[in-house]
Amino acid sequence: MDNDVKRLQELIESSNNIVFFGGAGVSTESGIKDFRSKDGLYNLQSKYGRPYEEMLSHTYFMNHTETFYQFYKEFMISTTAKPNKAHLYLAELEKRKNLTVITQNIDGLHQMAGSKNVIELHGSVHRNYCMNCYRKYDLSIVLDSKGIPTCPHCGGVIKPDVVLYEEALDDNAINGAVAAISRADLLIVAGTSLRVYPASGLIRFFKGRHLVVINKEPLYLGNAVELELTSPVGEVFGQLK
């Protein structure tokens, strides 16, 4: 365990209220591709004629629903991904610390690892609903469909309960995240570029003592950062006790 990881361990043990704010980089070690890195989804050559980032918009979903689902099933859903060392450590830490996980990810891996106190800012692939009658469905209705998934009760189009570009974040998720960050004495920001607004703006509500960044690329958050580790998130958490 190097000195930076030892210091992180000390900060965790000495803190009472901890918030882990994670992005796509938290799940890359589980085999899920991130978005903005050199090899991320948005830098791949699109096979659908439109940039992948554009295909994650509300407009694209409404106007090209069938193609959206082809892309969504191929790139946004992983049925083989398992929690990595970061997810598993946080689930164990929650048993002995007041910990809130705030995630921008939609993969559900924190819950799969056993975390209970999770705020999903951008929704989850595991929740889906009918746009007509609002009945709720799990992921199987999407995976089992051919073409556009439709509601067995009314025939309406099923939409994933994920926040697409042009859509607002859920008020309850935002308010919960603000409350948790505001009362935290340790905030760990991990695996995120902090380029997606309004999620990235939540960091400004932190008034606590210790701000830690774990990211492969520097985030340049200024002097407020007490500790910055430029290693994969799971690799760091795999060294903690």
Image: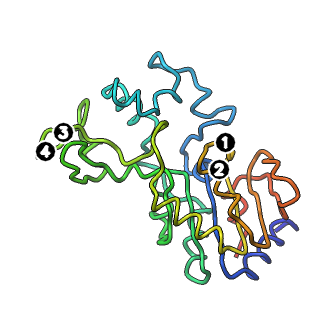
Of tags 1 and 4, the one toward the viewer is 1
Residue underneath mark 2: 200
Seen as rendered, the residue at the extreme left is 153
| Amino acid at dot 1 | Arg
Q: Is residue 117 left or right of residue 159?
A: right
Give me the C-alpha separation between circle 3 and circle 2: 34 Å
Dot 3 surroundings within 10 Å: few (below 14), some, or many (20 or more)?
some
In which quadrant of the rendered view does residue 227 lie? bottom right
For badge 4, the amino acid type reads Pro
Q: 157 left or right of 20?
A: left
Q: Earlier in the sequence, mark 2 or mark 1?
A: 1
Mark closest to the chain's N terminus, 3 or 2: 3
For mark 3, what is the residue?
Answer: 156
Per the image, label 1 sits on a secondary structure element best described as loop
In the rendered picture of this protein, how many numbered marks are placed on residues?
A: 4
Q: Decide: marks 2, 4 in contact (CB < 8 A)?
A: no
For the residues labelled 3 and 1, the Cα–Cα distance comes to 34 Å
Cβ–Cβ under 8 Å for marks 2 and 1: yes
- The residue wearing badge 1 is 195
